[in-house]
C-alpha cells in the first residue's frame, strides 16, 4: 500500500562504494510497491561522479538540487548546479549527461524519471 513516508524511514543504499563513482541513494517511490515513475534522493560525495555519461531513448529524467554543488556535463557544455537548480533531460535527446562533485562537501539532489520497459540507455564509451 502506498502511504505518506519520510525519507528517514528509508536506509541509504551505496553504489560503487570506495570508487570515484560512489553514490548514496534512497528510492522514495518504491515504498509499498514499485511505482511507474522513479523518485529518488541521491547524494554524491566529494570527488565522485556519475560516469559514464548517458541519455535515454524513451525515458525523461528530471534533476533538482537540494544541497551542495554539482557540475553538470551536458554534451560539450558544463554548468554549475546549486540548491534550487533544476534540469530536464528529455527522452530521445541524444546529448550525453553526467554529474561531478569536485567540491569539498556532499551534494544531495532529487532525481525523477519514467520507468519504460522499452527504454534503452546509451552510454559514452569508457
Image (spheres, rainbow, N blue to C red):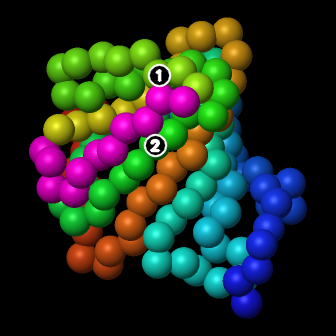
Badge 2 vs badge 1, beta-carbon distance below 8 Å: yes
Residue 109, given in percent of the width and then of the height, sits at 59, 38
Q: Residues within 10 Å of mark 2 (few under 14, many from 20)?
A: some
Q: Which range of residues does the magenta coloring cover?
A: 84-94
Q: Where does the N terminus fall, quadrant-wise?
A: bottom right
Of the two numbered discs 2 and 1 on the same chain, state the one appearing first in sequence. 2
Q: Residue 81 bears which disc, if any?
A: 1
Write the residue at 37% across / 33% down: 98
Residue 84, given in percent of the width and then of the height, sits at 54, 30
Q: Residue 63 bears which disc, if any?
A: 2
Whether residue 117 is in magenta: the answer is no
Write the residue at 43% across / 16% down: 80
| Residue at the extreme right of the image, as rendered | 9
Q: Residue 112 bears which disc, if any?
A: none
Work out how far the residue at label 2 is from the one at label 1, CA to CA, in angstroms: 10 Å
Q: Against 124, is 82 above or below?
A: above
SS of the residue under disc 2:
strand
- Residue 16 in sight: no
Q: Residues within 10 Å of mark 1 (few under 14, many from 20)?
A: many
Amino acid at each position: 500500500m502506498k502511504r505518506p513516508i519520510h525519507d528517514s524511514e528509508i536506509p541509504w543504499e551505496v553504489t560503487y562504494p570506495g570508487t570515484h563513482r560512489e553514490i548514496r541513494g534512497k528510492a522514495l517511490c518504491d515504498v509499498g510497491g514499485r511505482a511507474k515513475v522513479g523518485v529518488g534522493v541521491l547524494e554524491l560525495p566529494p570527488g565522485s561522479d556519475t560516469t559514464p555519461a548517458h541519455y535515454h531513448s524513451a525515458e525523461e529524467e528530471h534533476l533538482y538540487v537540494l544541497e551542495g554543488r554539482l557540475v553538470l556535463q551536458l554534451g560539450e557544455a558544463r554548468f554549475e548546479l546549486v540548491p534550487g537548480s533544476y534540469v530536464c533531460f528529455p527522452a530521445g535527446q541524444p546529448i550525453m549527461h553526467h554529474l561531478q562533485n569536485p567540491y569539498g562537501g556532499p551534494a544531495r539532489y532529487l532525481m525523477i524519471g519514467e520507468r519504460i520497459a522499452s527504454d534503452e540507455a546509451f552510454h559514452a564509451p569508457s
